[in-house]
Amino acid sequence: MADLKTETLKVQGMSCGGCVAAVERALLGVNGVAAAVVNLQAGQARVDYDPARTGREELVQAVVRAGFKVTP
């Protein structure tokens, strides 16, 4: 895999471990994502991905499709 880039997304709407799992599952389903770690208390998702295969917008859309909101 190429050099990975790390993106931190601020995720709103998570209230439990199930939400965390849903966001992680959505992010890991994006082509090019190597790792996704979601922190419920911080309301953040840290994503390591291959920028040649995906980008921030695709990550945001995956979170939105999972039913959550990403804030700037």
Image (tube, helix red, strand yellow):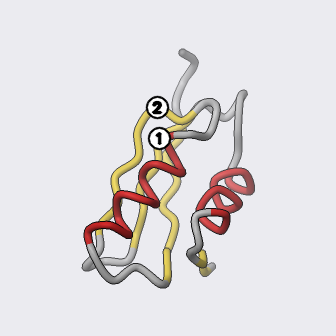
Q: Amino acid at mark 2?
A: Ala
The image quadrant of residue 69 is bottom right
Q: Is residue 23 above or below residue 51?
A: below
Q: Residue at x 60, y 75 (%)?
A: 70
Find residue 34 and name its label.
2
Kind of residue at disc 1: Asp
How crowded pointer 1 is (Cα within 10 Å; few <14, some 14-19, many 20+) is rated as: many
Which is nearer the eye, 3 or 63? Answer: 63
Please, which residue is most extreme toward the top here?
1
Q: Earlier in the sequence, mark 1 or mark 2?
A: 2
The N terminus lies in quadrant: top right
Residue drawn at x 47%, y 40% is: 48
Query: What count of labels does the image hold?
Result: 2
The reply to whether the C-beta atoms of the residues labelled 1 and 2 are less than 8 Å apart is yes
> SS of the residue at dot 2?
strand
Residue 22 in the figure: left or right of residue 61: left
Which residue does the image show at 71% across and 60% down from the upper left?
Answer: 61
Q: Which mark is residue 48?
A: 1
Q: Residues within 10 Å of mark 2 (few under 14, many from 20)?
A: some
| Marker disc for residue 38 | none
SS for dot 1: strand
The residue that appears at 54% across and 24% down in the rendered structure is 3
